[in-house]
Amino acid sequence: MITLKGKGVSVGIATGKLLFIDRSKFVPERKAITDVAGELQRFAHASKTAQDQLSKLAEEMKEKLGEEHAALFEVHSMMLADTDFTDPIRKIISEEVVCAEYATLRASTVLAQEFADLEDEYMSARAADVRDVAKRVIAVLSGAPVDPTSGPEQVILATDDFTPSETAQFDRSKVLALVSQAGAANSHTAIFARTMNIPAIIGLGASLSAGLSGLPVAVDGEGGELYVEPDADVVARLQEKAAKIKGERAQLEQYRGKPTVTKSGKKIKLYANIGSAKDADSAVNNDAEGVGLFRSEFLYLGRDDYPDEMVQFESYKTVAERLNGKLVVIRTLDIGADKQADYFKLPHEENPALGMRAIRICLTRKDLFKTQLRALYRASAFGNVAIMFPMISSVKELLQAKTITAEVRAELTEKNIKFNPDTPIGIMVETPASAIISDQLAREADFFSIGTNDLTQYTLAVDRQNESISEFVDTHHEAILRLIQMTVDNAHKAGIWAGICGSLGADPTLTQRFVDMGIDELSVEPSAILRLRSRINEMA
Ligand code: PEP
Ligand code: MG
């Protein structure tokens, strides 16, 4: 047995087979070969396997979601049968006597660029298809799975660090736990795992390696230990721990359906953070009183092109209907920084967290913003929806964003499309600037939701993705608590509510302090709701 120690970021016990996603396999190197005919054969074989995978996917999609969703996979499959795609690859293998992985990468990069340069928007978007198909062929050639959760078995997924776009693609029913070499406590890996209520450990270091793939492991998401080939003693101890966790969860059941109120009568709205329409079930099943943060950007991640208005509308409507009249706060696109999607073609930046992200993208790419706002307003006719802007740092930005929402409302009215014209518009307070001018912002917003993950990053100048500085991250720093107090006070002076939707909202050691500060709402991962309600209901 080997024991690896990291940082537990999502509580729970899991045992199963480890599957390491080896990224090095996805970046093929130029390798000389000796047998050209054999290599051409290998390419033809991989190409056929990829085609089979795509046909199967198309069929599955047709069954689950209908004809139109299957079309993309059919196009990809056709591409593999097209000599425009395959000939340049075969040529590089034959003339340069190099491996098929490298030839596929090089030829597809050239072809993708040719598409990207085309004027026609539809054709230029095909560049992403070329890259996707090439990635699939390279994955087949190198023996790596395209989607690690596409196999029949449930797995404990491991890698260097999970990207938000990867987690958006996982088949959640197949993931037992997440473990990573790197990662920071407030990274989206941790947030994703907590939302899914599966154990997660980050910061396990390089000892967590591809060599462990296929081995049985046990994960303790509380203690932060990963046991490789656990012995009988460890298994017995973990089983005991799992039973204890289960017992504690059962205890909390008495709080289901109860209001969240202190003994002295102070009511707190206890809402859930979600990242997709699928998570709405989790919010409801954990007895959330509403959704305080729907991270809409996950709709944009793990795909090759922008989600259109219809796709977005369906997702927002599903959540609004599932919550059955309870408030659903949908945050507009917060892409950029650690949440990247290639098709946005965001420029490389030295400091992406301080760069083109969130509301800055929406204000500079108005069409994109308007598509999302149209979908949001249309969904407002089907439930109790509120709109929230991320990363606001000035009144000017908020006013600009509100002007665009007014344009969208006017367009919908003109087209006779149903929506709720009184949909509340709030902001995330997640920059020190917005907390400091919260008195001014409160005059223009219907509510505040404090994003302590980014507020901590920007106030303490600590990169939330950089685990090497974790010793300098004091989430209870007085500066942050004062900014929260200031925001709550300014909200109340203006007659609006203020809540917390960052991870600090679920920190039980601060609940009393937040209640004393006058916080109106806490929005946390669904699995933390009953625990937090029990805590608040026990307070004086
Ligand atoms: C935050 O910054 O606290 C927040 C809730 O948003 P995200 O974690 O998605 O950046
Ligand atoms: Mg944030």
Image (cartoon, rainbow, N blue to C red):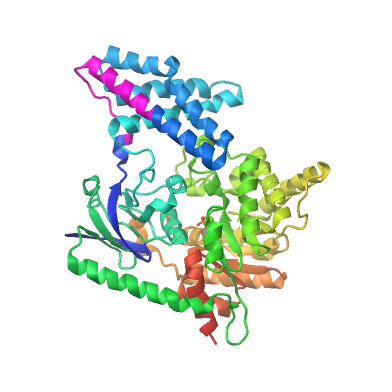
Residue 125 part of the magenta-drawn span: no
Frontmost residue, 356 versus 131: 131
Q: Give the side of residue 472 with respect to residue 327, left or right.
A: left
Q: Is residue 253 above or below residue 316?
A: below
Q: Quadrant of residue 26?
A: top left
Frontmost residue, 96 versus 285: 285
Residue sitting at 60 percent across and 21 percent down?
Answer: 119
Residue sitting at 45 percent across and 20 percent down?
Answer: 111
Q: Position of residue 444 (x, y in %)?
A: 72, 59
Frontmost residue, 413 versus 323: 323
Frontmost residue, 104 versus 65: 65
Residue sitting at 38 percent across and 46 percent down?
Answer: 149
Q: Is residue 453 above or below residue 411?
A: below
Residue sitting at 78 percent across and 54 percent down?
Answer: 421
Q: Give the side of residue 90 with respect to residue 458, left or right.
A: left
Quadrant where the N terminus lies? bottom left
Residue 42 part of the magenta-drawn span: yes
Report the magenta residues as a range.
26-50
Q: Quadrant of residue 389?
A: bottom right
